[in-house]
């Protein structure tokens, strides 16, 4: 049975997807605050696709780009700031367009 793309995955499934041991996933969860799986009352961790994508990015930074843990944290924080800046700029542009449309209606 195949899981849908939006299905939650256990830590064991995630470790197989990423081809890393379960203890590494747990370690990254402690070191990278951006990794926050859903924890059920049973204590089992569940990861959605967003979390798996973040873990893949961490793996790439550590294993391929050879960043230290702290270096990878800095990169992820910078990427988050850049995304927030892009989101804010998009919002500003949308507001400018709306302002112009309102001015056109009023004139």
Image (spheres, grey):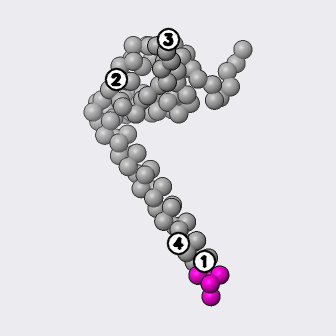
Q: Which residue is under mark 3? A: 42
Part of the protein shown in magenta: 102-107
Queried whether the magenta region covers residue 105, the answer comes back as yes
41, above or below 87, in the image: above
Instruction: Indicate the secondary structure of the residue bearing disc 1.
Output: helix
Q: Earlier in the sequence, mark 1 or mark 4?
A: 4
> Disc 4 to disc 2, how far (Cα)?
42 Å
Q: Which residue is under mark 1? A: 102
Which quadrant of the figure has residue 59?
Answer: top left
User: For the view shown, which residue lies furthest in the bottom direction?
Assistant: 107
Dot 3: within a 10 Å radius of its alpha carbon, few (fewer than 14), some, or many (20 or more) residues?
A: few
Q: Earlier in the sequence, mark 3 or mark 4?
A: 3
Dot 2: within a 10 Å radius of its alpha carbon, few (fewer than 14), some, or many (20 or more) residues?
A: few
Badge number at residue 96: 4
> Disc 3 to disc 2, how far (Cα)?
19 Å
User: For the view shown, which residue lies furthest in the front direction?
Assistant: 41
Residue lying at 65% horizontally and 81% vertically, measured from the top left:
105
Q: Which residue is under mark 2? A: 30
> Disc 3 to disc 1, how far (Cα)?
54 Å
> Disc 1 to disc 2, how far (Cα)?
49 Å
Instruction: Indicate the secondary structure of the residue bearing disc 2.
Output: helix
Residue lying at 34% horizontally and 23% vertically, measured from the top left:
30
């Amino acid at each position: 049975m195949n899981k849908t793309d939006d299905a939650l995955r256990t830590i064991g499934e995630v470790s197989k997807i990423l081809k890393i041991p379960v203890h590494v996933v747990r370690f990254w969860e402690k070191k990278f605050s951006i990794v926050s799986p859903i924890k059920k009352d049973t204590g089992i961790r569940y990861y959605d696709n967003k979390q798996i994508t973040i873990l893949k990015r961490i793996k790439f930074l550590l294993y391929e780009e050879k960043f230290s843990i702290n270096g990878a944290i800095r990169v992820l924080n910078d990427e988050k700031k850049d995304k927030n800046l892009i989101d804010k700029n998009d919002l500003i542009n949308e507001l400018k367009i709306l302002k112009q449309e309102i001015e056109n209606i009023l004139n």
